[in-house]
Image: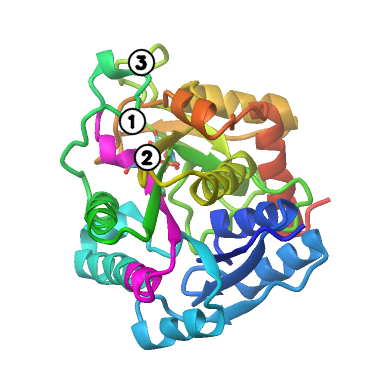
Amino acid sequence: MEKGRVLVTGAAGYIGSHTVVELVNAGYEVIGVDNFSNSSPDMLKGVEKITDRKIPFMQLDCSDREQFAKVFEQYPDIAASIHFAAYKAVGESVQQPIKYFENNLRSLLCLTELSVKDGRERGIVFSSSCTVYGEPDPENLPISENAPVKPATSPYGRTKQMCEDILRDCVTAYPSLRVTALRYFNPIGAHPSALIGEMPVGVPQNLVPYITQTAAGIRKELKIFGNDYPTPDGTCIRDYIYVCDLAKAHVAAVDRMLRTDGSDRYAIFNLGTGTGLSVLQLVNHFISATGVSLPYSFAPRRAGDIIKVWADPRKANRILGWKADTPIDDVLRSAWAWEKKVRGIR
Ligand code: UD1
C-alpha cells in the first residue's frame, strides 16, 4: 500500500535513517537527501538492507536553494517533509554560532519556501528539542508542551527555537502549509538489526556513545559530569528515548498531518518516555543489561548542563496514538550490539 511521498532531509543521519526504515515499513514512498557532512552513505546501505528496497536519494546541501529546488522539481508529489538536516553539537555551536545559524536557519527557510511555492498542501515535521525548555522549574516536571520556552543556553538551542518561530509564522501566512514540531528528549540505541545506529565523528559528546565506546575499549573510562546535583544520586536526570520508538512517532506525525482536516495546522509534541533516569542509573542499566564492565569516575560538572528534565508525553500518546515503550535494557543492548558490529567485536 503506497501512502504518498515523504521527503526526508538528513536521511543518512542517526534519527533520519531510522525514520526512513519506519516510513517504508508504514507504506510511504521516500525521497532522501543528505550532504554527508556528518553522516555516511553506509547508513543508506543499512536502510536498504533492512527494508530490502532501493531508497531514492539525492546528495545535496539543503541550504543550497538551487540544488534543493531540484528535489521538488523531480518529485512534485512530495506530500510531507521531515527535516532532520541540521548541525547538533551544543559545544561547537557556542564556538561557531554563525555556522549554526547559517546552516540550520537557511536549510529550514529553503525547505519551507519550496514547500509552499506551488500552493500544494504540504506538511513539514520539524526536529526540535527539549532544549527549548531550558532548565525546567521543578513544579513543571514532567514537562508538557505548555511549559514556557526559556532563553536558549546555546546557539544550537536558539536555532531550534528560531526554526519553530519561523514555522509558526509561515503556517499563519501560507494556508497550504501544516507543521508538526517534535521536541525530542534524549534519543539513544540502534536498530535491532545492528545495520544502522549512531555514528559520532571524533570523541562522542553524548552519553550513550561514550558508554559504548568505553565498553569497547576505545575510551579509557567514562567521566560522569557532576555527582553533586540536587538529585537522589547527585547525577543529572534525563528522559532517554529509543531511536526506533522516536522514528515511529515521525510516521504517526506524518499520518496525522495528511489525515486531519487542517483545523490545527501547527502542532507541538514532546517525544519522551515520561520517565527520568539519572546518569548513574543509566550506567548501571548498561552494566546489568550487557554484562560488560564499564570503568567510570566522577568529574566536575559540564558547563551548560541542566539538572533534570523528563517529558510529559501524554499529548503525543493521545493525539498521535503513539507511545515509547521499549524497555531501557533492550535499548542499551541495541546500542552495544551496534558498537560491537562497528568495531568488529564478537
Ligand atoms: C544535549 C542537548 C540537547 C541536544 C543533544 C544532542 C542541552 C541541555 N541538551 O543533550 O538539546 O539535542 O545534546 O546532542 O543542551 N554525560 C556524562 N558524561 C559524558 C557525556 C554525558 O556524564 O561523557 C552526562 C551529561 O552531563 C548529561 C547526560 O550525560 O547529564 C546526557 O548528556 P548528553 O548525552 O550529552 O545529552 P544532553 O546534554 O542531555
Task: Tell me which numbered mark, 2 or 1, is placed earlier along the sequence.
Answer: 1
Identify residue for label 3.
231
Task: Tell me which numbered mark, 1 or 3, is placed earlier along the sequence.
Answer: 1
Give me the disc on residue 268: 2
Percent coordinates x, y for residue 19 in the rendering: 61, 54
Give me the disc on residue 145: 1
- On screen, residue 142 versus residue 274, left or right, reads left
Provide the secondary structure element on which disc 3 rests. loop
Q: Which of 250 and 76 is in front in this view?
A: 76
Q: Nearer the viewer, residue 274 or 166?
A: 166
Task: Tell me which numbered mark, 3 or 2, is placed earlier along the sequence.
Answer: 3
Percent coordinates x, y for residue 266 in the rendering: 34, 45
**Does residue 130 sit above or below 289 in this rendering?**
below
Mark 1 to mark 3: distance in Å? Answer: 23 Å
Which residue does the image show at 42% across and 15% down from the upper left?
A: 233
Q: Is mark 1 within 8 Å of ligand 1?
A: no
- Which three-letter amino acid code belongs to the residue tagged 1? Glu
Q: Are marks 1 and 3 in contact (CB under 8 Å)?
A: no
Q: Does the magenta stretch include residue 119?
A: yes
Percent coordinates x, y for residue 177 in the rendering: 37, 59
Which residue does the image show at 33% across and 66% down from the upper left?
A: 108
Magenta segment boundaries in residue numbering: 112-135
Evaluate whether residue 8 shows in this view.
no
Q: Do the residues labelled 2 and 1 touch (CB within 8 Å)?
A: yes
